[in-house]
Amino acid sequence: MTLYPPAAGPLAPRLAVLDMNGTTVMDGGAAERAVEHALASCGVAGARLDAALARSRRSAGLDRSELFAGVFAGDADAARAATRAFAAAYDAMIAQGAVRPVPGAEETVHELRGNGVRVCLATGFGRHTQNSILEALGWMGLADLSLCSEDAGRGRPYPDMVLTAVLALDVDDVRDVLVVGDTAADIASGLRSGVGAAVGVLTGAQSRGELAAAGATAVVPSIADLPGLLWPRGAA
């Protein structure tokens, strides 16, 4: 499967916006456990907790603060408290070694940059949590840029993070941008911004069918397969 129309030739993107959790980073379900902890600490229990956790799973890829705002509709203080409790619980899990790279993720970033493609690591988590993950993995400075939803104003599925990366890294044409993620929200954010390609990976929350239904240009098993998709062996 090719990313670009054959007439366009072997065009490579100038910028790749890569999702973190589920795409370049794995946490063994720690984020969902932190969501459950945050909800329980704010008094959500029983059937209401079950419904909230189901809602969390359906909203994979979205900013967790938006999840809590929905669960605590009309109670902004409770939503903010849950967001803080989530961040504290997840940060503690990160400190205990919950996160690890998706195999081949770091090598893929190096290969992209080695081929002249700028790389932005993007997440729906807050800035402190994102930095905690980057520090835990030794990834500070791995990419050209890291962004979270609060840096851009709105998280996925809005296009803000992609467009913020375009502006920050002086990319002339958004069609020269590639977005990669494991959720429909990742794909939607790319398509809404007008990127040249939005690629789904199967290491995270959603299936090939769900990613294809969201409009993914291509779906690959892992971020490690991205270089082979961009630069097939034997291609001219």
Image (tube, rainbow, N blue to C red):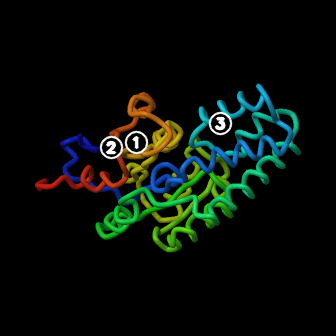
Residue 215: x and y in percent read 41, 33
Residue 101: x and y in percent read 46, 60
> Along the polypeptide, which appears first: circle 2 or circle 1?
1
Q: Is residue 138 above or below residue 228?
A: below
> Which of 105/195 is in front?
105
- Would you identify the image quadrant in which residue 54 lies? top right
Q: Secondary structure at mark 2?
A: strand
Q: How far is mark 3 from mark 2, CA to CA?
A: 25 Å
* Residue 56, numbered circle: 3
Q: Residue at x 33, y 43 (%)?
A: 220
Decide: few, some or many residues near mark 2? Use Cα within 10 Å; few <14, some 14-19, many ≥20.
some
Q: How far is mark 2 from mark 1, CA to CA?
A: 7 Å
User: Do the residues under discs 2 and 1 have CB atoms within 8 angstroms?
Assistant: yes
Q: Is residue 206 above or below residue 235?
A: above
> Along the polypeptide, which appears first: circle 3 or circle 2?
3
User: Do the residues under discs 3 and 2 have CB atoms within 8 angstroms?
Assistant: no
* Residue 220, numbered circle: 2
Q: Secondary structure at mark 1?
A: loop
What residue would you read off at disc 1? 202
Q: Secondary structure at mark 3?
A: helix
Q: How far is mark 3 from mark 1, CA to CA?
A: 19 Å
Residue furthest to the top in view is 47
Decide: few, some or many residues near mark 1? Use Cα within 10 Å; few <14, some 14-19, many ≥20.
some
Residue 41 placement, left or right of 171: right
Q: Residue at x 38, y 64 (%)?
A: 109
Q: Amino acid at mark 1?
A: Leu
Q: Amino acid at mark 3?
A: Ser
Q: Locate the N terminus and report the quarter of the image it occupies.
A: top left
